[in-house]
Structure formats: C-alpha cells, structure tokens
Amino acid sequence: KAGVTQTPRYLIKTRGQQVTLSCSPISGHRSVSWYQQTPGQGLQFLFEYFSETQRNKGNFPGRFSGRQFSNSRSEMNVSTLELGDSALYLCASSAGRLGGGGAWNEQFFGPGTRLTVL
Amino acid sequence: AQKITQTQPGMFVQEKEAVTLDCTYDTSDQSYGLFWYKQPSSGEMIFLIYQGSYDEQNATEGRYSLNFQKARKSANLVISASQLGDSAMYFCAMRERTSYDKVIFGPGTSLSVIP
C-alpha cells in the first residue's frame, strides 16, 4: 500500500506570493489533516478534511485555506506569504473514524513540504 | 484546553540501555487517545504507539511501551534496548474523541543514543 505523498517536497517563494501544496492520502483513507512545523512553535494543527468537508480548524489566519477532492486528495493554499510562513508542512491521513474498541485510527504522515519564504 | 507537556528537551542514552521519555497531558474529555511519534532528521513523522483512555493495559509495540497513568495524566514512552537508529525527536500527542482528527502535539524530546 502506498504511503501518504506530498508535492512538492521543497518550495522557495518570496513574500507576497501564494503557494499551493498537495497531499495524496493512503488509499481508502478519507481524512486528511495538515500541520505546520516550525522551530519556534513546534507542530501546530492547521485543519482537517473528511469527505470533502472541513471538520476541524486550528488557529491560523484566513490566508491559510484548504480543500479536499472527491478522491480524498487535499490541497492547502497560503496566500500573501510572510517570512514567518517558512516551515515544514506535514499532511497526515487516517480512516477518519473510530476503530475497534473505540480506539482512534492512527494518522500516517507524509514526508512533508519544506517551504522557504524569502 | 488541550495541552501536552514534555519536560525533557534533550536526552542521552547509552546504546542497549532503556530510556523513558516523559509526557503529561491535560484534557477535560473522558475519551481520548494518546500517541507517540518519532521524527528523524529526515523530517518524516513515524507512528510508534497508541493508548486509548479506556484501555486498562499499557500499550506495547516491540521495543516501545507506553506507561499510562490516567490519574496522573501521564503517558511516558519507554524504549528498551536503545539502538543508534533511535536517535530522533519524539513527540507525544493527544486526540480527543470529539475533535476527530485534530491532534495536539507536545514540544518534543530530542533523543541521542550514544555508542
């Protein structure tokens, strides 16, 4: 089974530009979550999509947005880039439902997209 | 509010020795899951182990075990027989049942295994 894939792996942008990152979940997974990882703030939850609907959202400005397609692939967009948006953006997929015994399915992470804003 | 605390920013352990990485959490929810992830320098997040709030037994996965003390709200990761490949960042994380796939991560512990 193929893992979570993210494209591109590396991006360099300048302030004010916008960027779109893509995530393809594991086959059969319907939930895709996005996280931002920086040395100063650590890992922070951006948003989660399940069956094309945003089910959860973190505390990020409206410049950060996302969507999910019918095949569960997801994209996130950052508009008007700022220097502080430089980070590793991680995508994670899961079945998005409780498993046996009430246990949550674990999330499987992609390799990440490293965004540098100059 | 959800919160995860990892009080050990960095740790060293001798190869083949056991090591415990601390994690405490705060939640008002009765149903939640606790996770540990490993992040090598390559950046990928690797799932290690899961503990549900209603699980009565501590979770184990190979060399990894989770010391779950619900009353103290702690979920420490124990790595037995450390290997050089265990050198990485380790994150404790939590997901509340009502928050679906929103996972809150701790600040992480950097583990270095010494030959």
Image (cartoon, coloured by chain):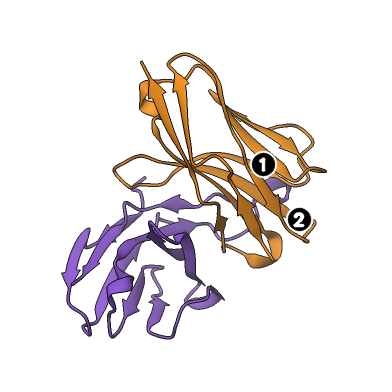
Chain colours: A purple, B orange
Q: Nearer the viewer, residue B12 or A103?
A: B12
Residue designated by label 1: B51
- The picture places residue B90, in percent across and down from the top left corner, at 48, 40
* Amino acid type, label 2: Ser
Relative height, residue B1 to residue A80 (above, below): above
Distance of label 2 from label 1 (alpha carbons): 11 Å
Crowd band around label 1 with a 10 angstrom C-alpha radius: few (<14), some (14–19), many (20+):
many
Q: Chain of mark 1?
A: B
Q: Chain of mark 2?
A: B
* Amino acid type, label 1: Gln
Find the residue positioned furthest to the right.
Answer: B71
> Which image quarter is the C terminus of chain B in?
top left
Residue designated by label 2: B31
Q: Nearer the viewer, residue B19 or B66?
A: B19
Relative height, residue A19 to residue B35 (above, below): below
Whether residue A31 appears in this view of the structure is: no
